[in-house]
Amino acid sequence: MVRDKNLRFREIYMAVVVVESPAKAKTINKYLGSDHTVLASFGHVRDLPPKDGSVDTEHDFAMTWEIAADSRKHVRAIAEALKSDDELILATDPDREGEAISWHLQEALAKSLKSKKVSRVTFNAITKSAVTEAMAHPRQVDTALVEAYLARRALDYLVGFNLSPVLWRKLPGARSAGRVQSVCLRLIVEREMEIEAFRPREYWTVTAHLETPRGQVFTARLAALAGDRLDKFDLATREAAEMAVHAVAARALAVTAVEAKPATRNPWAPFMTSTLQQEASRKLGMGAKACMSAAQRLYEAGHITYMRTDGIDMAPEAVAAARAEIGRRFGTKYVPDKPRIYKNKAKNAQEAHECIRPTDMSAAPDTLKLADDQRKLYELIWKRTIASQMEAARLERTAVTIQSPDAQVELRATGQVVTFDGFLKVYDQGRDDDEGEDSARLPQMMQGETVTPAKGAAAEGLARAEGPEDTTATGLVRRAAAVCDADRAILGDQHFTQPPPRYTEATLVKRMEELGIGRPSTYASIVTTIQDRGYVAKDRNRLVPQDTGRLVTAFLSNYFPRYVEYDFTADLEEELDDISAGTRDYREVLARFWRDFSAALSETSELRITDVLEKIDEVLAPHLYPPREDGSDPRLCPGCGKGRLNLKTARSGGAFIGCSNYPECRFTRSLSAPADSAAAALDGKMLGQDAGEDITLRIGRFGPYVQKGEATADEPKPPRASLPKGWAPETIDLERALALLALPRRVGEHPEDGAPVEAGIGRYGPYVKHNSTYANLPEVDEVFTIGMNRAVEVLAQKAARGRGRATAEPLRALGEHPDGGKIAVMAGRYGPYVKWEKVNATLPRGVEPEAVTLEEALALIAEKASKGGKKTAAKKPAAKKTTTAKTTAAKKKAAPKKAAAAEGAEGTAETTDDSAAKKPAAKKAPARKPAAKKTTASKTATKTTTRKTAAKTAADTAPEGDTGDSDTA
């Protein structure tokens, strides 16, 4: 109750509004009055605990939820606000994940919501008009969307939690499997297998550089020879190409037909999530994760509409605003007569929100103050949106036919010219690969005109070809990959067919969309997960499967084929769509899936690792044992010449190729090093002898090394030394090999205490050592030359740093944290990181220090701090020694207990992954209590350790979904 100015009392109802992130809360708070309290949930607040039984398959798939450790304070803050306020308004994102967050909040706050009003509002853009309109039309939480989330979350849990342990037991070195993650990995592996199986085919083309009577030069391609149309492979050899070049050069040529046709090009549809990620990759070099992070910042700041969508339609008022802006900027001729309407073409368009567009069409990129990555992405979105409502481009396409009088030779020249640029004035879509479109303008030509070879015009093309130049008896000029007439006007070029290109993140997302695999909220996290697992690596922006990824795909394709089928995964996505539409019961979907999946799991229970390895060895044989150039058996061991190569597993995890004659023959190599590769050819190379023993170069599964002598019963492991990074195997001689085998090298005695100083090469590179002090050396070669003076200097510098040297200089200063304190990018031993006070957050793989923005740094810091990165717990007094000792002992015994089961859990979002890993941090109290009995202390420690292990391993099987706004900056 409050008193107004007339001293009368009136009742004011206050409302608590909950959104996902502080940035979103800050923007919305500007639009709502003082009678609203806007708080952030920081993404999902509850998740399935990483343990058996979180989804109870015996009791109608009942799910056990747990509030994440770092979310408790946020839930408490909301509950505290509700004590004085009368209404809870759930304003999370307008998609399935947003609906799920609202449902979780309603469930978690049930005790605080007695007699309180609860409503749900959604808006597609964070603008004053959109937020005000949403507040005027509240509703209840959509049960169908929540059930679709429950089904998806349960499926991810059941697959990850049950399939991952099977992988660990049957395929050492594998980390996890996931419902969509594994299918996505299969796409990449199969593309790589296509590339490896590809055999290039030679073909030649003939291009004539011709000149019109007015002196204008153009090019035409040979289309028919001896009266027959030429197909791609009709000129298959150099000899055929030479005959064709000679035939063209020896004949007079004239224009026999000129055909000009008008054409139009319509603009591209506005962005949805997948096309935005594809264009950001093509034009900006942004990965899917970086793209969505920048888009989220733009959305939270109110600059664009919601960025996780399958929809390409645009609100009528937005279309009108775009048309008005086009007319104002470019003139009425660029505005089409009618607005353009776009329809979805994706196989499974589910989350039919509006397209991704600017909230204000008049807000051009140069009028907004944005971080560099956000500015580039916003410019892309703004241009695409404006272009989508512009007039079509008008072109004129011309085709000219040129023939010899005897009709034995026919050439064609094509070109096009833009007569009205239309939408091209603003935007044109990038391309993943060259589409071969002819965009050259042809000179004016008329039927009957004679054209002549343009002397010297083909010289540049000939010069680009490989090989020495020679001249034939007929006067043709040749190189290895080209042939030209004497006037250097007619050029024959050698070509080879190319294998299909490896996927980029953009083309992978495009393919997933075409197949109906995944959804807008999952694309980025799936692509990121398979890279984080080490299944896939990026090479020049292309995705390359690693050996472990191949093994996992081979295992799943043979023992769980149905669950990595593209159609099965897409059909399951359609069923989940039906659940969200309210036309299918989610428990029926789960029951049918679990019946078949559990049966498939039980069929693998009797499998032995040797059976699995034999099967995978057979499946991957074309990759592991490619044909040798000399035609010999590719499985014959190059080490002993008797044994057979086959797939083996190491105790430490992972797989390698080894000899069947082990331990007599210890030949090994990695999966990705074929036996006939240049490196493998050096295996066993004799470098010389030392003290009567052979010094040889070997190629092992961990790389090249040198060895002294051979393995014997008395000495199964003879002296060995790995080649340092940067030392090519072919450059190793006896002197360098002996120097490596002699490490660590004694430099001398330290002048202060007489203790030995040594130089060597360790896990972290070259070093000098004195007592327990190790100091890194900048170059490997210095290990073999460093003297005492230099060694003492390096050790002294290390000791000075250890006593507390000046703070390292940052690579970049980013600015101030909202809570105070400077944020900077620092260089670390394990890569660059951002630093704020005591929080150090490693930069994600592929992110360059120079490209990090303050907003991205804030998000990384918030994520790290929520995981316990800001180590306030370290200030607490340590537990008693006796208890700590017992805890340590208990750890050794209890750690393996739940690890295998826990790592299989797949959550619904990146946030849940973090919260799972944070839960054990709160369990500290038992360690501070004095131990009354040994058994009790041990049990307590065991439970704590087991829970920690489970949480840690659960984080290894990253969830495939996405929480929506899970950012904390």
Image (cartoon, rainbow, N blue to C red):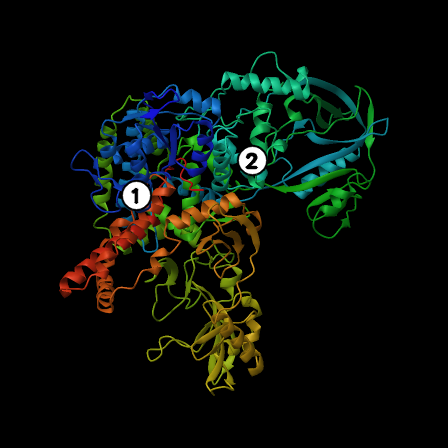
Give whichever of 651, 64 is nearer the camera.
64
- Residue occupying the point 73% across, 23% down: 400
The residue type indicated by label 1 comes to Arg
SS at mark 2?
helix
Residue in the picture at 58% in, 20% down: 322
- Rendered location of residue 901, percent (x, y): 25, 50
Q: Is residue 601 above or below residue 804?
A: above
Percent x, y of residue 317:
52, 17
Disc ID at residue 163 = none
Q: Amino acid at mark 2?
A: Leu
> For the residue labelled by badge 1, is the local secondary structure a helix, a strand or a loop?
helix
Q: Nearer the viewer, mark 2 or mark 1?
A: 1
The crowd level at tag 2 (other Cα within 10 Å; few <14, some 14-19, many 20+) is many
- In-front residue for pair 122/842: 122
**In which quarter of the view is residue 250 placed?**
top right
Is 808 above or below relative to 869? below
Residue picked out by circle 2: 377
- Whether residue 626 can be seen here: no
Q: Which residue is mark 1?
A: 72
